Each structure stands twice: as C-alpha cells, then as structure tokens.
Image: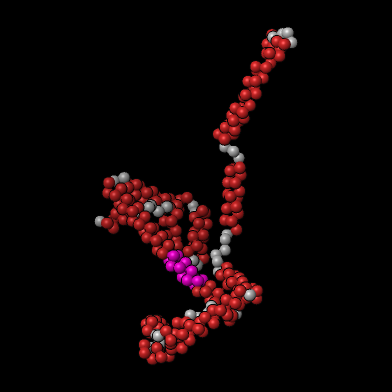
Amino acid sequence: MASANADAIKKPTSAYWLWLGDNRSKIAAIVGAKGSEVSKKGGEMWKTLAAAAKVPYEKRAQEQKDAYEKFAATDEGKKALAEKKTAKTEEKADKTAKIEAKEAMFKAKEERQTERACKAAVNAVEKDDALKKPCSAYWLWLSANRPKIIALVGAKGSDVAKKGGEMWKAVSATEKMPFEKQAKEQKDAYDKYVGSAAGAAALKAFKDAKSAAQDEFKPKEDPAVAVAAATAAGAAAAEAAVPAPAAVGTKRKAKEVVASPEKDMAAKVAPAAAKARGRPAKAAKLGA
C-alpha cells in the first residue's frame, strides 16, 4: 500500500520526458551515452517533432497529471504528500548536518595543522644562547641525576619528572646548595645581559622575529570586509557628529532664555525714551 501511495504522489512526467524515455537509446546511439549530450540532442529533436507524433505523449502526460491531482485531493493523498514532504525535509536536514559536520572536521584539522606549522616556525627562530632563560636549581639537579632516575622508573618523561620531583623534596639543603648557586649565577648573567643595550636589542629582535613568524599564520582579513567595516565606522562617526533634533531645539531655547532679560529691558526702556522725545512710541510707529 505504501508503495502504491509512493507511486501515486510522484509528480507527473511531461510529454517531452515521456518521449525522451522512449527514444533515449536511439539518441545515445547518435551522440553517445553522456546524459547532458542526450538531453541536448533530445531537446533539439523534440522541437522539430511533428505535432501528430507528440499527441500520444501529451495524452499520457495529461492522464498522469489528472491521476496525480485526483489522488492529491483525497485525504489519503494529502497524508501521503505530507509524509513525503516531512521525509524530504528530514533528508535535507540530515544531509546538511553531515555536510556541516564534515566541514567542521576539515576546519578543525586545518586549524591543528596551522597551529603545528606556526609552532614549528616560531621554534625555528634562532635564539642567542645568552637569551635562554636560566634554569632553576631543580632542573639543574634533575639534568645531573636523570640517568639515575631513568634506571629506577624507565625513560618515559612524565615518570622521570614525577620521580625527580619526589626525590628533590627529600634532597638535603647541603646537596641543593651547588645547584642553587649555579642557578643564581645563570640568573645574574641573564639579567645583566638583558639589562645591557646589546641584550635588550637582541631580545627585541628575537621577539620581533617570533611575532613575524606568528603573523604568517594569522588568518588574512578579507579586503571587502575591511572596507565595509571602515565605511560603517565612518557613517556612525558622521551620524554622531550631527546633533539630534531635540538637542538643537534645546540649544535654541536656551539661547532665547539667556537673551530674554535684555529683551525685557529694551521693552521697558523704549516707551520711556519715546515719551522723553514727546511722543508715544506706539503711536509714532502706527503713524509712520
């Protein structure tokens, strides 16, 4: 039943595709089996096909269309179409999820490769021995006693470090003294060199070289994105520079308030001056 419904909700085929289905082998014998070539040649032949030769295919296409529309109008057909639509949506979502997962995996792999390459490039930057950070007393002791510790726990680095840490805690102050002295001498020499003009210049050159190596692996900004961002920033700055209507109105009102006492004084003085000249100010104005 499900298969019958599936066939019934298939979109009806056009007259051209019905004709192409019947004539595909004949066309393939002329142009080869490549689908695009068969379709192209088929389209050219269909245009020149006599109307009488098209009639049976047009009739079959109409019958399919009528049957499809009739079934689609029934409750069973509506349900089948809804199920088909849901299945298609789920299939599309599943396909999209797979593509996104594949892209994410590829991106993560690319990022790991870039990170490793960046780290290798940074480590490849030559460093003056005098710029190497001085070792602590513990690391000097560990280096001197590594063969002994390996004989106890094996050559695995983490096991050697763990055992070395345990043993260092139990080492007496007297035994630690020569290593602490050597560590201090290294630190003093490092601080003295870095504090000198030559050392400071060498340290800066080293840091600049490391930064340059890291910059080589930074993602390059898309010029179009940079231009768009600059344009948006410029528009925002221009908009901020123009006072809002409310602010303009407030400023004007403030000016009027400041100027109003003078206007009031002028209004009081004018009639008095006019009276002193022997005529009312308003009457003289009206007669003018």
Q: Which residues are magenta?
A: 102-115
Q: Is residue 141 above or below residue 250?
A: below
Picture quarter with the N terminus: bottom left
- For the question of whether residue 204 can be seen, the reply is yes
Residue 273: give x, y in percent of width and height.
Answer: 71, 14
Residue 269: give x, y in percent of width and height.
Answer: 67, 17
Q: Is residue 114 magenta?
A: yes
Name of the residue lying farthest toward the left:
1
Instruction: Name the residue located 29 percent from the left edge and 54 percent from the top edge.
Output: 5
**In the rendered view, how is the structure colored?**
secondary structure
Instruction: Name the residue located 56 percent from the left edge and 70 percent from the top edge.
Output: 214
Q: Foreground residue, 223 or 163?
A: 163
Left or right? Give the position of 253 relative to 28: right
Picture quarter with the C terminus: top right
- Using the rendered view, name the quadrant where residue 200 is placed: bottom right
Instruction: Name the residue located 51 percent from the left edge and 53 percent from the top edge.
Output: 47
Instruction: Name the residue located 57 percent from the left edge and 56 percent from the top edge.
Output: 225
Q: Foreground residue, 186 or 206?
A: 186
Q: Foreground residue, 30 or 138?
A: 138
Q: Foreground residue, 10 or 79?
A: 79
Number of labels in the image equals 0
Residue 201: give x, y in percent of width and height.
Answer: 64, 73
Left or right? Give the position of 8 relative to 107: left
Q: Is residue 105 above or below residue 129?
A: above
- For the question of whether residue 286 can be seen, the reply is no
- Using the rendered view, name the quadrant where residue 163 is placed: bottom left
> Which secondary structure is most common in the magenta stretch?
helix
Residue 158: give x, y in percent of width and height.
Answer: 40, 81
Q: Is residue 124 magenta?
A: no
Left or right? Give the position of 268 relative to 80: right
Name of the residue lying farthest toward the front:
174
